[in-house]
């Protein structure tokens, strides 16, 4: 019997993150600093909105684009936050999380052989989605000395006649890096000069610390050539609701909607009802979660640095990305040994691309007391191995 699996799928390795979750799930007394998911429950008022929608019998398909109410609320939300105007009818699409929005963007714009520049370390799905859509991911490394901000000159050096798009994600997973406006302006100029689409994953836009997030589509001349991806999983503790969105010019959005029509039909109806309340009436909840993440951020970054695991200051998301070379191990060995010996789960930086080698990702989306315990275990670990 011949091999029926496509070469594109075979070319993509399994997620390096899932391996550690699967192992940790079989162990007792594990403290997980691995999962990129809020430990908070969805705010009560948002929960109530979803429950009420079910009680009122709202259990049917919505428009392919999402409910009119959801898209109008989203338009107002983005205008309030960033001053950007999006037409609810033609320029907004409600999706099954940002993951679907990313898939739609790649499928809508890429032809076989088209190149997409992807700065790394990056979220594990970025290069995979480019490959699944028939494109070629051209990775550009970022470095701690630059606070993991991708440098414009590195992007320009990677551009070829086949380059069609740039995929960026700031605040960044896994590093927690943010992008300064001056650097973004230079990248925007490159996109205009070389006529590129910019796919900007802004899922962590509300989780920034002492920093003002810059929406890529809000930069001069960037609105028409940006596909902005966002959602509520991280900022509003709604991962399980699977609700996200894409915002783009009408021609780009129409192509994405076409793929969405045939693949998904519509995002979950209940989740759309909940997301409206999240946008309109949950700012206090977002602020409270952000303050607690900031408290944990200071604890874990300070703890890593005291242990000799040099960690730059993450200014966004809920990840720290310490350099683990003081342990004398590579990333995979460090993560494997730490899990086996001290039952602390971290993700090797190499899971996020070759430029993540020598680092490990730690999520501080877990209780303060658990982070304290994890740092105590790391202290014992580094006494043996550091």
Image (spheres, rainbow, N blue to C red):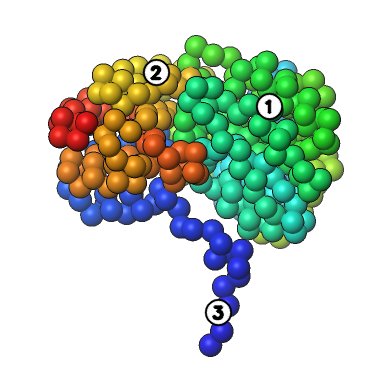
Mark 3 Cα shell of 10 Å, populated few (<14), some (14-19), many (≥20): few
Mark 2 Cα shell of 10 Å, populated few (<14), some (14-19), many (≥20): many
Sequence order check: which comes first, mark 2 or mark 1?
A: 1
Rendering coords of residue 240 (x, y %): 46, 44
Return the mark for residue 3. 3
In this view of the protein, which residue sits in the foreground, 385 or 224?
385
Return the mark for residue 102. none
In this view of the protein, which residue sits in the foreground, 16 or 162?
162
Q: Quadrant of residue 87?
A: top right
Q: Is residue 350 above or below residue 12?
A: above
Residue located at (56% from left, 36% from top): 141
Q: Which residue has dot 2 on it?
A: 294
Q: Are marks 2 and 1 in contact (CB under 8 Å)?
A: no
Rendering coords of residue 322 (x, y %): 37, 29
Mark 1 Cα shell of 10 Å, populated few (<14), some (14-19), many (≥20): some
Relative placement, left or right, of 227 versus 52 is right
Q: Is residue 265 visible?
A: no
Mark 3 or 1: in front is 1
């Amino acid at each position: 019997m011949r091999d029926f699996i496509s070469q594109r799928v075979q070319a993509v390795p399994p997620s390096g993150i899932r391996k550690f979750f699967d192992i940790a799930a079989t162990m007792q007394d594990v403290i997980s600093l691995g999962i990129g998911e809020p430990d908070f429950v969805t705010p009560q008022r948002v929960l109530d909105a979803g429950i009420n929608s079910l009680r009122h019998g709202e259990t049917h398909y919505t428009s392919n684009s999402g409910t009119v109410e959801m898209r109008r609320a989203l338009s107002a939300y983005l205008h309030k936050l960033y001053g950007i105007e999006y037409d609810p009818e033609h320029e907004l699409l409600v999706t099954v999380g940002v993951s679907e929005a990313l898939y739609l963007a790649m499928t809508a714009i890429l032809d076989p052989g088209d190149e997409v520049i992807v700065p790394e370390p990056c979220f594990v799905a970025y290069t995979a989605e480019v490959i699944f859509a028939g494109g070629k991911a051209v990775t550009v490394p970022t470095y701690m000395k630059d606070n993991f901000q991708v440098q414009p000159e590195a992007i320009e050096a990677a551009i070829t006649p086949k380059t069609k798009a740039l995929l960026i994600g700031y605040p960044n997973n896994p590093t927690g890096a943010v992008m300064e406006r001056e650097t973004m302006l230079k990248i925007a100029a490159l996109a205009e000069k070389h006529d590129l689409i910019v796919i900007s994953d802004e899922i962590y836009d509300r989780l920034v610390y002492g920093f003002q997030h810059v929406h890529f589509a809000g930069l001069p001349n960037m609105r028409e050539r940006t596909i902005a991806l966002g959602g509520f999983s991280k900022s509003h503790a709604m991962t399980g609701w699977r609700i996200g969105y894409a915002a783009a010019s009408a021609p780009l959005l129409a192509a994405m909607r076409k793929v969405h029509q045939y693949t998904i039909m519509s995002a979950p109806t209940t989740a759309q009802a909940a997301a409206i309340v999240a946008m309109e009436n949950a700012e206090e909840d977002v602020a409270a979660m952000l303050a607690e993440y900031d408290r944990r951020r200071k604890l874990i970054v300070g703890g890593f640095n005291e242990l000799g695991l040099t960690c730059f200051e993450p200014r966004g998301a809920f990840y720290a990305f310490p350099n683990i070379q003081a342990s004398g191990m590579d990333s995979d060995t460090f993560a494997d040994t730490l899990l086996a010996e001290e039952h602390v789960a971290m993700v090797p930086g190499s899971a996020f691309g070759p430029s993540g080698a020598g680092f490990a990702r730690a999520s501080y989306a877990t209780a303060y007391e658990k982070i304290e315990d994890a740092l105590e275990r790391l202290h014992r670990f580094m006494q043996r191995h550091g």
